[in-house]
Image: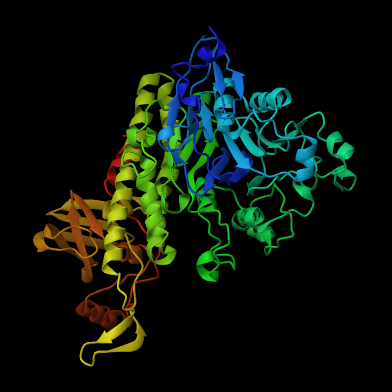
């Protein structure tokens, strides 16, 4: 049997890359949070996959263990080939794919040994370095790194050593940055030229966020390093070595002295600004921000999500406020997937890794957890596109259309969508660690039940998130329809003239599930006489609904029979209207947001306002409080039910 025949195997066929149209440029943002500075003690490696122009689509896949099957190989797009071990490990992946060609790149993987790999952040070397040691045409490349290491290795150190050995023997065709982590340690690897690299073990008490640039300078700060044999001698011999206090500066040497560019450096500063604002300072193009820093407080998954949603809001570099179209934000619209992988050292290896997968750019799509113990994925999450365009059978398409629509106006359209997902994620990030620990306890005596529990959670939440995205898309589209008008100033039909007063358009506010909101913020909820009653801290909200016909403004629904109702707070009737659909009670954001924030008097009827003022001598607010937490949900009670242990 010849080598080409041996390459093809049923299990790893998905790793065999067919000719495809590759994006013009791959430009990503990476992050690392050591376990000593995370809120739950989990190590985090994370990365966005970006391309300009946007091309690939993304999905979630599970690759099962293959036992005792010799003669298999993995092959790259460029002809790179490497033998696989007889037994390859089970792993989850967040691959990217390019249309009908079915190319899959692993991007982020987590295997049954609790090994996580994120590959790669593209970096760039100077001409002098590449002239001295050119790229190897059929050397290892980005598309195979995360899959090869996850399938072949048990530990982060083993994976780092294997990648370095491959570069020694076969070379590399690209300049990349790779992050690897397990329960004990994490590694950061930079590949500079065809055969030169540096790998450093990362400290557990530091964090990192970086754009498309090499981050290592001197290797003095690192306790353990692996380097290529000629890493230091090659630049000295060829005259392009740069030194800092007699130590070779890897960035200045291999990237080029003074090569800092806002395109990447601004994102690195952005990570410092969000996680360590006390030391970030004002941005300076000429400042080389260090790879590692100490965050101001312990970092959560929500904090890392916020990094990948950052558009430099509140700074001079926010495109929406400075009007520039030449600023590369972290939350670029052309990202096609983002993964945040947690590795817990308190769980069994086979369920120690949790991948928070976002199958689109992060701005207006959710991060959904996938355990490395999973054996099932929702079909829409697992599907890749059969066409090089919109495909309703892929989760990516559902999220990407919502992202594209919301991005047309980040303030009017996007803010509500973003905060919708943030609140849903808030619940998931606060409950999933307990859920996975519970599953781990069950697995000690009944692995099948634990596996079924995790699979049920995975598929239910994935399907629900897609459903919610479609609901948001429809409601946002209807909001845009209602507010699309060439005429932007108030008009008098009496005089047929315009005033100088612009028409006010309020930001899009999604509907939310009252029960979801109540449970998240600690309200006691009961039902009686066709009423929903919410109680907390001496406040009582009563929602009653009766059937009526008519169109519900902002609901996105066609005219027809709906259950509409009134909302009272502490016995006072408000101006809000509740409605019920498919057994779920929905309220406008402001109703519960105001009461939950401590304001006893939300938007009341005129009579109730007068009564409140007379009793307290206090004027009720004339308008809702500033736009705060947005929560919307279709079927979110199902997510709660999955997380409950009773």
Please identify the quarter of the rendering in which residue 457 is found.
Answer: top left
Residue at 42% from the left image edge and 49% from the top image edge: 426
Work out whether residue 523 can be spotted.
no
**351 relative position to 28: left or right:** left
Instruction: Locate the C terminus by quadrant.
Output: top left
Residue at 36% from the left image edge and 67% from the top image edge: 507
Please identify the quarter of the rendering in which residue 374 is found.
Answer: top left
**326 relative position to 549: left or right:** right
Work out whether residue 495 can be spotted.
yes
Number of numbered tags placed on the structure image: 0
Near-viewer residue (463 or 251): 251
Percent from the top left, x then y, of residue 212? 64, 48
Residue at 28% from the left image edge and 81% from the top image edge: 613
Percent from the top left, x then y, of residue 403? 40, 53
Near-viewer residue (344 or 531): 344
Please identify the quarter of the rendering in which residue 409 is found.
Answer: bottom left
557 to 15, vertically: above or below: below
Percent from the top left, x then y, of residue 431? 41, 41
């Amino acid at each position: 049997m010849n080598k080409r025949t041996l390459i093809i195997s049923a299990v790893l066929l998905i790793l065999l890359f067919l000719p495809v149209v590759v994006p013009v440029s791959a430009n990503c943002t990476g992050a690392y949070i050591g376990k000593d500075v995370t809120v739950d003690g989990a190590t985090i490696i994370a990365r966005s996959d970006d391309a300009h122009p946007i091309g690939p689509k993304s999905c979630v896949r599970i690759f099962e263990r293959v036992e005792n099957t010799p003669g298999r190989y993995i092959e790259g797009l460029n002809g790179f080939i490497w033998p696989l071990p007889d037994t390859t490990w089970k792993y989850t992946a967040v691959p990217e794919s390019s249309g009908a060609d079915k190319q899959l790149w692993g991007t982020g993987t987590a295997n049954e040994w609790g090994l996580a790999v994120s590959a790669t952040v593209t970096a760039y070397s100077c001409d002098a370095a590449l002239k001295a040691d050119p790229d190897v045409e059929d050397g290892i490349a980005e598309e195979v790194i995360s899959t090869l290491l996850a399938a072949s290795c048990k530990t982060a150190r083993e994976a780092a050593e294997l990648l370095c050995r491959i570069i020694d023997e076969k070379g590399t065709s690209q300049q990349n940055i790779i992050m690897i982590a397990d329960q004990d340690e994490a590694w950061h690897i930079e590949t500079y030229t065809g055969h030169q690299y540096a790998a450093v073990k990362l400290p557990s008490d530091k964090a990192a966020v970086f754009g498309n640039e090499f981050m290592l300078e001197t290797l003095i700060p690192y306790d353990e390093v692996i380097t290529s044999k000629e890493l230091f001698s090659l630049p000295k011999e060829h005259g392009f070595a740069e030194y800092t206090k007699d130590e070779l500066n890897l960035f200045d040497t291999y990237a080029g002295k003074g090569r800092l560019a806002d395109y990447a450096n601004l994102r690195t500063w952005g990570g410092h600004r969000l996680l360590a604002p006390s030391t970030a300072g004002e941005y300076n193009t000429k400042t080389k921000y260090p790879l590692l820093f100490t965050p101001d407080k312990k970092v959560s998954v929500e904090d890392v999500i916020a990094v990948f949603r950052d558009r430099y809001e509140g700074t001079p570099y926010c495109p929406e406020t400075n009007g520039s179209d030449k600023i590369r934000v972290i939350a670029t619209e052309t990202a096609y997937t983002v993964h945040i992988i947690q590795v817990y050292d308190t769980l069994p290896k086979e369920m120690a890794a949790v991948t928070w997968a976002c199958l689109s750019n992060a701005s207006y799509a959710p991060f959904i957890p996938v355990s490395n113990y999973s054996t099932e994925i929702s079909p829409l999450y697992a599907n890749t596109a059969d066409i090089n365009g919109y495909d309703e059978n892929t989760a990516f398409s559902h999220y990407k259309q919502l992202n594209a629509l919301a991005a047309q106006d980040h303030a009017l359209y996007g803010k509500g969508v973003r905060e919708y997902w943030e609140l849903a994620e808030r619940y998931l990030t606060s409950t999933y660690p307990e859920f996975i620990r519970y599953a781990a306890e069950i697995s000690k005596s009944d692995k099948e039940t634990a596996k079924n529990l995790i699979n049920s959670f995975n598929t239910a939440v994935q399907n629900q998130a897609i459903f919610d995205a479609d609901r948001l898309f429809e409601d946002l589209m209807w909001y845009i329809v209602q507010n699309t008008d060439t005429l932007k100033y108030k008009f008098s039909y009496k005089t047929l003239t315009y005033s100088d007063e612009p028409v006010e358009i309020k930001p899009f506010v999604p509907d939310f599930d009252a029960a979801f909101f109540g449970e998240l913020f600690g309200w006691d909820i009961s039902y009686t006489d066709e009423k929903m009653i919410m109680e907390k801290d001496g406040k009582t909200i009563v929602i009653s609904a009766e059937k009526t016909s008519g169109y519900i403004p902002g609901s996105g629904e066609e005219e027809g029979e709906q259950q509409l109702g009134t909302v009272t707070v502490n016995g006072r009737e408000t101006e809000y209207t509740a409605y019920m659909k498919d057994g779920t009670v929905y309220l406008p954001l402001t109703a519960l947001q105001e009461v939950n924030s401590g304001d006893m008097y939300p938007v009341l009827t005129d009579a109730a306002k007068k009564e409140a003022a007379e009793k307290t001598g206090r004027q009720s607010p004339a308008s809702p409080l500033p736009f705060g937490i947005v929560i919307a949900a279709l079927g979110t009670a199902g997510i709660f039910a999955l997380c409950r242990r009773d």
